[in-house]
Image: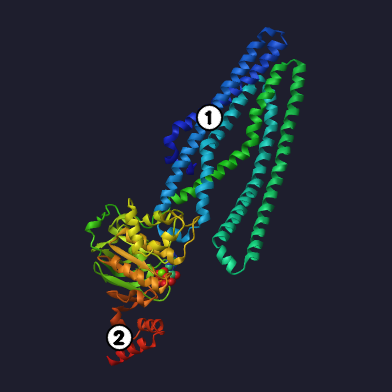
Amino acid sequence: MNVLKQLKEFYWHEKKWLFASIFFLMCSTALGLVYPNLLRFLIDDVIRAENYSLVPYIALSVIGVIAVKASFQFLHGFTGGRLGNTVAYNLRNALYSKLQYLAFQYYDRAKTGDLMSRLTADLEAIRQFIGFGFAQVLNVFLMLGFGTIMMLTLSWQLTLVTFVTVPFIAITALRFEKTVHPAFRSVRKAMSNLTTAVQENITGVRTVKSFAREPYEVEKFSHRSEDYKANHITLAFAWAKFFPLMELLSNFCIVLLLTVGGWFVIDGKMTIGELVAFFSVVWYVIAPMRDIGLHINNYTQSKASGERVLEILHQYMHVKDKTGASVLKKDQVQGSVKFEKVTFAYTDKEPALTDFNVDAPAGTVIGLLGPTGAGKSTVIQLLMRAYNIREGRITLDGQDIRDISLTSLREQIALVFQETFLFSSSIRNNIAYSRRDVSMDEIIRAAKLAKAHDFIMELPEGYDTIVGERGMGLSGGQKQRIAIARAFLRDPKILILDDATSAVDMETEHEIQAGFQELMKGRTTFIIAHRISSLKHADQIIVLDHGKIVQRGTHEQLLREPGRYYETYKIQYSDHPSLVKKQIERRLAK
Ligand SMILES: Nc1ncnc2c1ncn2[C@@H]1O[C@H](COP(=O)(O)OP(=O)(O)OP(=O)(O)O)[C@@H](O)[C@H]1O
Ligand SMILES: [Mg+2]
């Protein structure tokens, strides 16, 4: 119930539909009790009393009851369906929106498959329960209540006999539920293992093929498939037992009632009409008993689903706007960035960045160099506030970035990553993703600056070619150029190039560099690169190792001192021995 209470905001404003759905179900259930009475009347007062003139009235009443009951059922189905779907809609949107705003920290650990199933299977369970399950549980009590009263008015002795036998049905149903529930869960788990295998395999198909691991994958899948089959057979076996067993028990109850009831009729304690009526009411008690396990199962399942959904909704927002966070206006931002004694760790282990200090006046270019895992990308993550720092501070135009609204902070930044993600949409939309309301001319201009225009024009449908997940595959370098075009279009105050040209050849890089020179004008730029050629023009180059700054200075300054920068330079220009020789000579001369 606690879960229901916590989800209240999602269904309570729909309470009119909830009450309507319950009301119509109650009406339909109550109306069902008219049949036994009609039957009794038909047998005792019409057939046995040979009062046949009443037959048309009875027939009309039966048709009337059927029609009205059907209308109530329709109304229950309609209102319940509306309620369930509206609640699911609200929850789905709330979940999705929460997922959009959850910090990177959450996604570092989240599993795609798990999130997907929460958004689909769990929501479905909640939709079913709120739409129908809840009313059905109430209906169980209604049926038991109405049925018992009706039975008592017909014969208290037979009612007693019923209540001696039906609990066995309930006990069996509950025991069945106990065995079938874990079996059901195993089936679901096996299914999820199966889909994960398929999903991973499809995503990683190139890796599988390149290592010729198809036989292993086939075998892995076959094991999981086997597991799924076995679990399903166990479940099928349980179900196969259940129905005959229920049939047996219900029939036993009926036979017992028939024996006792028949004897009552012969003895004159009861009329035939009453006995027949009693038999048709007895299902009001047997059916809920038989389904009790099912209802309990539905309830526990949707409760578990509710908990899983709430877990996301209540997820702590690691990074969020401060109250009264300032909103930056684009034309007022200068773009000077300062890192002051920043120390940051992703986990409890050693920090990814220690005592990091950088002063980047507006419009300057900062180069970041260092071996893999040195913490270069971390610097960028912190600047866009993907994570909150524990020590030190980062400022933009002198203002702590924690005091700036997240959206307006990120609006000042354009990023080109090592890996470019393309949405399954047209190239035009992929480039335009970085800004709202842009004209085709602007898109083409950006693509030209990013040296992407020519290859785009060679694609089958030019800018309308669908790329990404289900569209055309692009080469790494082409994807990067799209990302660069995105950055051009965004027109940011701060530009970040995280290994942005790693996937393009030297020649293209050279061409793009020219575009970058233009793009960097008037913007504070952070360039992360492994190639010295990409960052030698930076105003300030920072060399990182194990999260610490080991060197800083301009290209010329760094070449003059022994250290990692110079070593890197030597390796990268070793194909130009004369150049290196010249450098060394110059160093020695100083
Ligand atoms: N999301 C994360 N969760 C936990 N640890 C992380 C995460 N991202 C990076 N790290 C760790 O932080 C350290 C610095 O990583 P970072 O990505 O900043 O390196 P990098 O200098 O950009 O390397 P590369 O040149 O390979 O891109 C590494 O030890 C890395 O394992
Ligand atoms: Mg990196």
Q: Quadrant of residue 371?
A: bottom left
Locate ligand 2 by image quadrant: bottom left
Residue receiving disc 2: 560
How many numbered tags mark residues here?
Answer: 2
The residue carrying pointer 2 sits among few (fewer than 14), some (14 to 19) or many (20 or more) residues within 10 Å by Cα, namely some
The answer to whether residue 127 shows anywhere in this view is yes
Q: Residue at the spot x=71%, y=9% of the render? A: 49
Q: Residue at the spot x=67%, y=11% of the render? A: 55
Which of the pair 92/403 is nearer the observer? Answer: 92
Q: Secondary structure at mark 2?
A: helix
Residue receiving disc 1: 76
Q: Nearer the viewer, mark 2 or mark 1?
A: 2
The answer to whether residue 528 shows anywhere in this view is no
Measure how far apart labels 2 and 1 are at the Cα level.
83 Å
Which disc is residue 16 wearing?
none
User: Does 332 appear above or below 62?
Assistant: below
Whichever of labels 2 and 1 marks the residue nearer the N terminus, that label is 1
Amino acid, disc 2: Arg
